[in-house]
Image (cartoon, grey):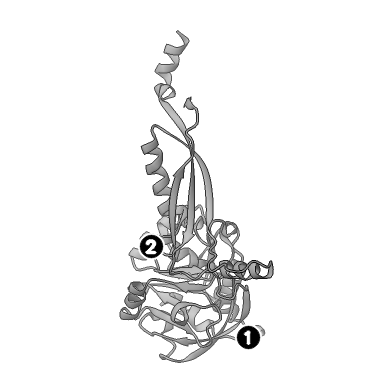
Amino acid sequence: MNIGIIVFPGSNCDRDVRWATEGCLGIPTSFLWHETTDLDGFDAIVIPGGFSYGDYLRCGAIARFAPVLNSLISFVDKGGKVLGICNGFQILTELGLLQGALTRNKNLHFICDRANLSIASTKSSWMKNYKKHDFISLPIAHGEGRYQCSHDVLKKLQDDDSVALRYADNPNGSIHDIAGITNKKGNVLGMMPHPERACDEALGHIDGKSILSTLLS
Amino acid sequence: MLGLTKEKENPINFLKVSLFKARVFVHLRPSVLDPAGEATRSATKRLGIDGVTQLRIGKSIELEIEAASKEDARLKIELMSDRLLANPVIEDWTLEFKDEQKALTT
């Protein structure tokens, strides 16, 4: 069982994710340079946080054309699990694997804080260690995390039970307090909070551990 | 003679293309909050200008493109705008051609 972490020029949470998955959870993890197209042998893929391509044009707009992401679409079609964290979430929406878009925080600040989140759905296996309405606490660090979508898309997300995480105290103005969503099938999760920064007991919080541990289920 | 040889090697060299200059304006859809625009609007008051009721910030992308015709250029820029320059979930765009530049034969 292997996890692949996609690395773009400008990714900066790639090594944190590997520390969490390999160092804290003991899952073999490799880095995948964005120019690779071979995803064979991986059970799950993580798109980490950072500023891919300097976030030029829009967050994730240039990264979505990376060769590795063509392969990622087939990987997802075959049911492979993909987790996009922060910039990874932005890339997944630009790519169209997740609906909506992430826009500038309402208060214009880059917010680096700890956010209380409620588990909004346990439909997908990502949240299988939780019950609906459980609360967890994870770090957030973003300037463009305000989730935005049309009313039709919002209704569809709700009908499909695809809203995975909500902010208890909305920090960025996201529509319906949305902090993370899945695709309809449930194998793709995008979230602005950073589970990889809450896996090591040395950091004081380990609420991210159970989300990352589901990469292999 | 030289021309003939060249044409055999690479006939595409003799295709006529023109250079078009265009500008794509990308703006947030009206329904999308523009906090940067709002912050800028509040600065207009501090500057002493009253009455600015709306201020929204977009992007202007200037480009030059080689194409067989203006229509060809338009199709390419439309594709580029839909798929790269703007995110249709939150943004609209408009295209404006600037004066056609000298025809190029490459």
Whichever of callouts 1 and 2 sits on the residue coming sooner in the sequence is 2
Q: Is residue A25 left or right of residue B4?
A: right
Q: Residues within 10 Å of mark 2 (few under 14, many from 20)?
A: some
**Can residue A3 be seen here?**
no
For the residue pair A20 and A88, the one nearer the viewer reads as A88
Residue at image location 47% in from the left, 83% down from the top: A166
Residue at mark 2:
A75
Amino acid residing under circle 2? Phe
Residue B11, position in %: x, y? Answer: 40, 21
- Check the residue under mark 1 and report the chain it is in: A
Q: Residues within 10 Å of mark 1 (few under 14, many from 20)?
A: few
Amino acid residing under circle 1? Glu
Q: CA distance from mark 1 to mark 2?
A: 33 Å
- Check the residue under mark 2 and report the chain it is in: A
Residue B22, position in %: x, y? Answer: 48, 42
Residue at mark 1:
A201
Residue at image location 51% in from the left, 78% down from the top: A173
Q: Quadrant of the C terminus of chain A?
A: bottom left
Which residue reaches farthest right?
B47
